[in-house]
Image (tube, rainbow, N blue to C red):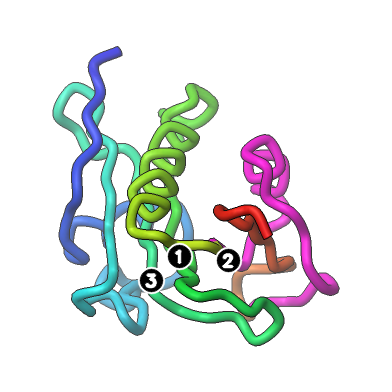
Amino acid sequence: MRDEIREITTQETLSLRQRVLKPFLREDQCVNPGDDLITTHHFGLFYDGKLVSVATFLLESHPDFPAGLPYRLRGMATDVSYQGQGLGQKLLRHGIEHLRQKRCDLIWFNARIKAFPFYEKLGFLYHGPLFEMKDIGPHKVMYKHLIPR
């Protein structure tokens, strides 16, 4: 394949976040708290030079998961015309491996129902009840321990 993964800026994530995840917002409204912290990692997968998938990892704990170095996945988005080709999985695996090398022991996030199968294939588990996110729909917390407990 003709793809490349590299660390990108917050600004580079916004167009895909807006188009795929929050089309009801303006691009500048798709910035998440913590996006510009030194501990945050934004990764982009480029296919033939075009940014087609993004993922952001924020150093953030979850109250139900004790962890030494927990990261939260936010803004995972793949251009609709490139979905189903394994590019999002490749990007997520890259981010997980990057964090594992930094001794991250837990990744968690709020997943949309339609993304459940995607994350299940990568070994993520569910936690807690289904909940509603305004303007977006039902979600469930998902997580994965990176270091055996």
C-alpha span from label 2 to label 1: 7 Å
Given contact means CB atoms under 8 Å apart, are the residues at marks 2 and 1 in contact? yes
Question: Left or right: where does residue 75 sit relative to residue 50?
Answer: right
- x%, y% of residue 146? 56, 53
Where is residue 13 drawn, in percent x and y? 26, 57
Amino acid type shown at disc 2: Phe
The reply to whether dot 1 and dot 3 touch (C-beta < 8 Å) is yes
Range of magenta residues: 107-133
Question: Is residue 12 at least partly visible in the picture?
Answer: yes
Q: What x and y, as percent, mark residue 138? A: 74, 67
Q: Tell me: residue 126, above or below residue 46.
A: below
- Residue closer to the observer: 76 or 142: 142
Mark closest to the chain's N terminus, 3 or 2: 3
Q: Say which residue appears at 63% left-offset and 56% top-offset.
A: 144
Label 1, label 3: how many angstroms apart (C-alpha)? Answer: 7 Å
Q: Earlier in the sequence, mark 1 or mark 3?
A: 3
Q: Which residue is mark 1?
A: 74
Res 111 quadrant in image? bottom right
**Label 2: which secondary element:** strand
Label 2: few (<14), some (14–19) or many (≥20) C-alpha neighbours in 10 Å: many
SS category of the residue bearing label 1: strand
Task: Name the disc covering residue 58, or none.
Answer: 3
